[in-house]
Image (cartoon, rainbow, N blue to C red):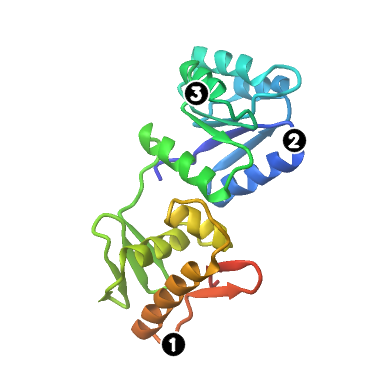
Amino acid sequence: MNKTVQVLIVEDDEAINNLLFEIVKDEGYEVKQAFSGTEALIYFKEQSFDVILLDLMLPGKTGEELLATFRETSDAAILIISAKETQHSKVNMLRAGADDYITKPFDNAEVAARIEAQLRKYKRLSIPKTIEYKDIVLNRETKEVTVQGKLINLTAREFYLLKLFMEHPQKLFTKKNIFETVWQQPYFDDENIVNVHMSHLRQKLSKANSTEEYIETIWGMGYRLKK
């Protein structure tokens, strides 16, 4: 990363605002929280932002009004996060200058991924080719993974599972998070497919280094990298 990414969250619902704050903070970005349109304008005038997460139904000034104001002087990546699900709303916001539109309720991993995609698009984020965790090195470009310097043979699903965990080392992933992110399909409460692929991935990592545990199960909740 070339610099610390500055993110402004504009959301009047305190619980949702704080959830977005945790998602963004976990990615290593600097975050400012605004709970009204008026407060957002104050912060906007005080500093520049790389990303703005913008709700539409706000006290003070609406999200639509803020979008128009932001676009007058800023080239920040603006992601609308709204409960308005109609195609008409989405098309209008994208035509008005929004870069993306996320519908509530949202998946945490999807929000993080969409922010990252916008940052790459705007070239504000330099994504390294490799990620490292303990003695694992994952190469995003070649799709190769080594453990203690030795290449291990992973299937495409296993590679993307490991990549998901290594890109978000502090995050606890539910099976729904994992399935919808890696398989990119709606989750129908079928735990077996995730369990099987996770088991195969862990077996291969254990075979490469039996003295180290990389992924832990949090019973009743999901999986995460072992700290």
Measured as percent of width and height from the top left, residue 105 is found at 63, 42
Dividing the picture into quadrants, the one containing residue 41 is top right
Quarter of the image containing the N terminus?
top left
Three-letter code for the amino acid on which mark 2 is drawn: Asp
Measured as percent of width and height from the top left, residue 191 is found at 54, 67
Q: Earlier in the sequence, mark 2 or mark 1?
A: 2
Residue of label 2:
13
Dividing the picture into quadrants, the one containing residue 155 is bottom left
Residue of label 3:
98
Q: Nearer the viewer, mark 1 or mark 3?
A: 3
Left or right of 204: which side holds 190? right
Q: CA distance from mark 2 to mark 3?
A: 21 Å
Farthest residue to the bottom: give it. Answer: 211
Q: CA distance from mark 2 to mark 1?
A: 46 Å
Q: Secondary structure at mark 2?
A: loop
Q: Earlier in the sequence, mark 2 or mark 3?
A: 2
Q: Residues within 10 Å of mark 3 (few under 14, many from 20)?
A: many
The answer to the question of whether label 1 and label 3 lie on touching residues, with beta carbons closer than 8 A, is: no
On residue 211, which mark appears? Answer: 1
